Image (spheres, helix red, strand yellow):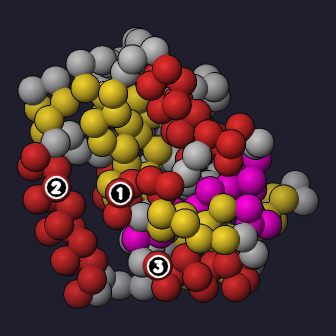
Amino acid sequence: MTERKRGPTRRDLLTGTAAMLTLAGCQSGGETAAPVTIATDENCDQCGMVISEHPGPVGETYYRNNTPTGHDEPARFCSTSCTYRHRFAKEQEGWTPATTFLTDYSAVDYEVRTDGGATVLTHHLDASAFTVSAELTVVANSDVESAMGTAIVPFGDEGDAESFTEEYGGQTLPAEAIQRELVSRG
């Protein structure tokens, strides 16, 4: 079991300021887009699973001029894979993503553990755990699992992503460079 602890850094403060400035310009339905805390009983808008019952990174997406069925914005997801699968599917239907937030494992204390034979990460559902996807580097194809297969693990600090690959394998790429083929495998 590996546990990572850290306090706020100068980078955290600068990233938070940059995110606030970025969000100030992102409008969805007339309101400023901001991450929300995912309640323990909420279902994934892609696959329907209860988000809090599964390990690993989660996501949220605001769309321009469209809202998820059955609840207020944003659309909420049990995994990074479901976040991108939903985005790709909705783009085919003409929806335009405005802002996507993913769990930022550089911004949270997390634990890697074995659960039923799989290596998994703790999930973080609080709004403060999310960062705009454009500011994240992800680790894909590692040995770590999430709700929907191999986890795509986001980090706000590229060095943290590289350290994660040294321990758990995989490769890094910008979160916004994820292609349909990567998430259709899981």
Q: Are marks 3 and 2 in contact (CB under 8 Å)?
A: no
Count residues near mark 3 (Cα–Cα under 10 Å), then give few for <14, some for 14-19, many for 20+. Answer: some
Coordinates of residue 80 in the picture (x, y in percent): 56, 47
Q: Residue at x 11, y 59 (%)?
A: 21
Comparing 158 with 125, the one in front is: 158
Coordinates of residue 48 in the picture (x, y in percent): 61, 23
- Which residue is identified by label 1? 134
Q: Secondary structure at mark 3?
A: helix
Q: Residue at x 27, y 83 (%)?
A: 11
Coordinates of residue 86 in the picture (x, y in percent): 53, 29
Q: Residue at x 35, y 57 (%)?
A: 134
Residue 6, placed above or below residue 122: below
Q: Secondary structure at mark 1?
A: helix
Question: How many numbered discs?
Answer: 3
Q: Is residue 174 visible?
A: yes
Answer left or right for 23 relative to 122: left
Comparing 4 with 134, the one in front is: 134
